[in-house]
Amino acid sequence: MISPVALKSPSVPLRARNEGPMTSLSPKNTVLELHLSPTQISLDDGGNINTGLRIYTDGSKTERGVGAAFCVLTDVNITHRWSTRLSLRNTVFQAEILALLKAVEHAVSLPTQQLTILVDNQASINSAANPKSHNSIARKIFKLLHSHPHIRVSWIKAHAGHIGNEEADRLAKEAAETENFPETPLELPKSFIKTFLRHKMLATWQMAWDDGDTGRLIHNLIPKVSLHPINWTRNEVLFFTGHGPFPSFLHRFNLAETSFCSCGEIGTPIHYATVCLLTTSYHMAPPSQQHQPIWFRRVANNSTSRRKIHNLLHFLQRETSLFRPDPN
């Protein structure tokens, strides 16, 4: 019979023996936290590693395509090469981490021996060494490295004259530049999907904005949709939309008895900004009827004119009774 004492949770975390990859057990968690052996990953320059089998990886992106490659260096001889082309929509990071995966898979297929994979991209190394990485390729690499602790991965400085690194770079660029090169399909990166959806959304929004029946005054001022806000003050919004303290607007909703200003003319925004006898301090040159849309655009795009509009609205709201027609 097993003693009840033996069934108690350990009071301190247990670790696997040092011979293999580190595995920590916590009494608070039922899921094992896997970690690579500290000797498996190095971000120090591995350019001085010249013993054992060495595999060099690289990824490349040009205007014509994306390529990934690795080569095996035994002593000073290239004994194996692999390369593939990716979609132009894929990123150079995807090429780098795919090259690392293929290098690890090749290393796993070889007899167990001293072996180092040299990578000139630290981001792909960090991703592959992270047990919680969201990248599916990185998780595959982690599992393979965890189960094959004799495989080491080290960063190496790019374009430093290392034979293997230069050959991997050449292979990756060749694959990227060659249109009929065998291609490996990869899922599209999130960055591409986000950009594509943003462009699609903006195009749909633009079409709706151009074909709409409402908001035509603002469409004249802001014909192109944008995710960036227009920095108008409240008074500027009231003026350019016409939804402010103007008799022409208030009368439509039975908030004023007439659409006329006390000066005898229709009380529109442009009336107060150009010709009203009661607002001469805020006047700007009046446009002809056919040039009113252009006039509004110029005012909206001129900071001095917008400041004058802002002050005009302050005056209209402060002196409301002045602009009401005499009921007698």
Image (cartoon, grey):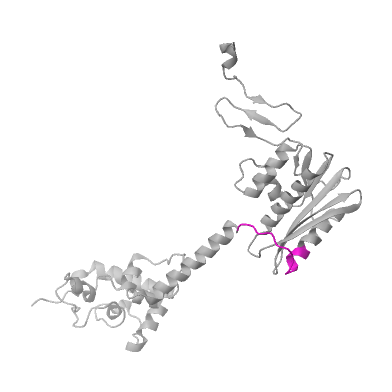
Asked if residue 283 is positioned above or below residue 112 in the image, the reply reads below
Residue nearer the viewer, 147 or 310: 147
Asked if residue 95 is positioned above or below residue 277 in the image, the reply reads above
In the drawing, does residue 192 fall left or right of residue 74?
left
Give percent across and percent down for residue 25.
Answer: 62, 27
Q: Classify the position of the N terminus by image quarter.
A: top right
In the drawing, does residue 162 fall left or right of residue 294?
right
Q: Is residue 209 visible?
A: yes
Magenta-drawn stretch contains 185:
yes
Q: Classify the position of the C terminus by image quarter.
A: bottom left
Asked if residue 210 is positioned above or below residue 147 in the image, the reply reads below
Asked if residue 27 is positioned above or below residue 292 in the image, the reply reads above
Hey, which residue is sitting farthest front in the picture? 1
Residue 224: name its quadrant.
bottom left
Please provide the residue range marked out in magenta.
Answer: 173-187
Give percent across and percent down for residue 115.
Answer: 82, 42
Give percent across and percent down for residue 234.
Answer: 34, 65
Residue at 58% of width from left, 11% of height from top? 3
Give percent across and percent down for residue 140.
Answer: 67, 45
Residue at 64% of width from left, 61% of height from top? 90
Q: Is residue 162 visible?
A: no
Magenta-drawn stretch contains 57:
no
Residue at 19% of width from left, 71% of height from top? 253
Number of marks in the rendered image: 0
SS assignment for the magenta stretch, majority: loop
Residue 235: name its quadrant.
bottom left
In the drawing, does residue 167 fall left or right of residue 33?
right
Residue 217: name its quadrant.
bottom left
